[in-house]
Image: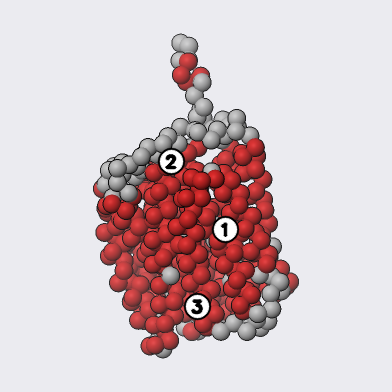
């Protein structure tokens, strides 16, 4: 039997013409959190050279969600105005310059300023990438989102595993600056895409222009995804900033605390890869947020009681909870109908999510300073988990928004 003409000319058959885009998405994801993940594990080494105080650490911790929120707010407009592909190139370039810039400073203020620039580039990339997935891979949203969230998790997992030893051997400046190579490498596939429209057409299926009569914030599903994103962002950036401190105060060595942070990040990789596929294929999607919620409740309760006891076990169980992140990213595309809708949803979810996530690192540190222990800050984190569960259930049980 001959192949129908529609199939012979299908631009989406199988991955033809889109492997360069897939590589570009993977490198953007790999660059997404590097500038955050490289600081906390070697903060004691950095402070030997730069007089960073606890206040500076709180500012650095809060700068990540703050920059992601601010640039998440303007990224949808930038993407529509200048195009998704040019903006992802700008994002990677700005991020790389910021990473390199903070290796040259000699004051805490300089370190913070260059960090903000690197985070600005990452913030634009965060919002632009989900619409790129929907634009170029409308037939493989789950698989490509799994690739994206896997490499995003990898971007937090790699530095804690190696950076402490690298910093001891070469100094903190080289150990931080070397990661700029990832952003520079990411420019290559996107420049190829931008200069080769025939390879990756700008108006791929799924990029149709559909104007909704309602703004994105009027859809219940948008708020469901957002409260999930808020909670997981608060948890991630709080743990990046304070988990090593909490473990050291429980009697764990600096090196071991850095390794535990590495385990905390690297063991989220399987969930980052599998969650988008499960979210797209499970008929009873509501099971996923229930499992994620349970993982966070069990692990954080145990860490609140005694973070120095069975630490590895509780960190591993907490990785079920971290699946809330790939779940939220996947739902941005599964609960919108067009690329334009995905841009709007991604911008809304990440702007609101990261705005509230600023509370995490700052509030956690404030409660610790106020009470002198880690129990109350951990209880505050646990108190938000039921809200995440409700948001996850709303996202699971909602129809795609008409955008």
Q: Are marks 1 and 2 in contact (CB under 8 Å)?
A: no
The quarter of the displayed image where residue 69 is located = bottom left
Disc 3 and disc 2 in contact, CB within 8 angstroms: no
Instruction: List the residue tagged with mark 1.
Output: 121
Point out the tag, 1 or 2, that comes first from the N-terminus: 1
- Image quadrant for the C terminus? top left
- In the drawing, does residue 173 fall left or right of residue 395? right
Question: Residue 106 appears at what percent x and percent y?
Answer: 69, 78
Q: Are marks 1 and 3 in contact (CB under 8 Å)?
A: no
Q: Is residue 264 visible?
A: no
**Nearer to us: label 3 or label 2:** 2
Q: Which mark is residue 58?
A: 3
- The answer to whether 171 appears left or right of 374 in the picture is right
Mark number, residue 109: none
Q: Which mark is residue 339?
A: 2
The scheme the figure's colours follow is: secondary structure
Provide residue 121's location: percent of width, then percent of height: 57, 58
Regarding mark 1 in the picture, which secondary structure is present there?
helix
Q: Position of residue 402 (x, y in %)?
A: 31, 41
Above or below, 5 relative to 277: above
The local crowd at label 2, few if under 14, some if 14 to 19, many if 20 or more residues have their Cα within 10 Å, is many
């Amino acid at each position: 039997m001959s192949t129908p003409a529609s199939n012979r000319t299908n631009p989406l058959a199988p991955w033809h013409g889109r492997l360069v885009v897939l590589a570009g998405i993977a490198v953007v994801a790999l660059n997404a959190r590097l500038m955050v993940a490289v600081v906390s594990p070697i903060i004691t080494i950095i402070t030997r050279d730069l007089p960073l105080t606890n206040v500076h650490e709180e500012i650095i911790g809060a700068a990540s969600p703050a920059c992601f929120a601010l640039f998440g707010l303007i990224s949808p407009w930038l993407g529509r105005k200048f195009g998704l592909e040019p903006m992802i190139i700008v994002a990677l370039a700005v991020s790389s310059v910021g990473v390199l810039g903070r290796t040259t400073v000699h004051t805490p203020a300089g370190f913070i300023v260059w960090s903000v620039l690197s985070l600005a580039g990452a913030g634009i990339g965060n919002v632009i990438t989900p619409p790129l997935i929907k634009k170029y891979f409308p037939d493989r949203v789950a698989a490509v989102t799994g690739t994206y969230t896997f490499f995003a998790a990898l971007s937090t997992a790699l530095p804690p595993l190696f950076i402490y030893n690298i910093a001891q051997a070469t100094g903190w400046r080289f150990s931080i600056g070397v990661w700029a190579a990832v952003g520079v490498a990411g420019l290559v596939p996107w420049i190829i895409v931008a200069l080769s429209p025939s390879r990756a057409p700008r108006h791929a299926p799924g990029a149709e222009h559909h104007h909704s009569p309602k703004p994105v914030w009027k859809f219940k599903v948008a708020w469901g995804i957002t409260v999930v994103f808020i909670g997981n962002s608060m948890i991630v950036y709080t743990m990046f900033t304070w988990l090593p401190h909490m473990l050291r105060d429980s009697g764990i060595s600096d090196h071991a605390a850095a390794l535990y942070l590495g385990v905390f990040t690297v063991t989220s990789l399987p969930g980052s890869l599998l969650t988008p596929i499960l979210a797209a294929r499970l008929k009873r999607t509501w099971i996923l947020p229930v499992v994620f919620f349970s993982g966070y409740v069990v692990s954080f309760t145990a860490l609140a009681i005694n973070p120095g006891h069975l630490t590895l076990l509780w960190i591993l169980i907490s990785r079920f909870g971290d699946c809330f992140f790939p779940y939220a990213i996947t739902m941005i595309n599964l609960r919108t109908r067009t690329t334009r809708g995905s841009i709007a949803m991604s911008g809304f979810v990440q702007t609101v999510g990261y705005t509230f996530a600023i509370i995490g690192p700052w509030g956690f540190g404030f409660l610790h300073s106020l009470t002198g222990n880690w129990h109350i800050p951990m209880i505050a984190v646990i108190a938000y988990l039921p809200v995440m569960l409700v948001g996850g259930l709303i996202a699971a049980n909602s129809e795609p928004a008409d955008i």
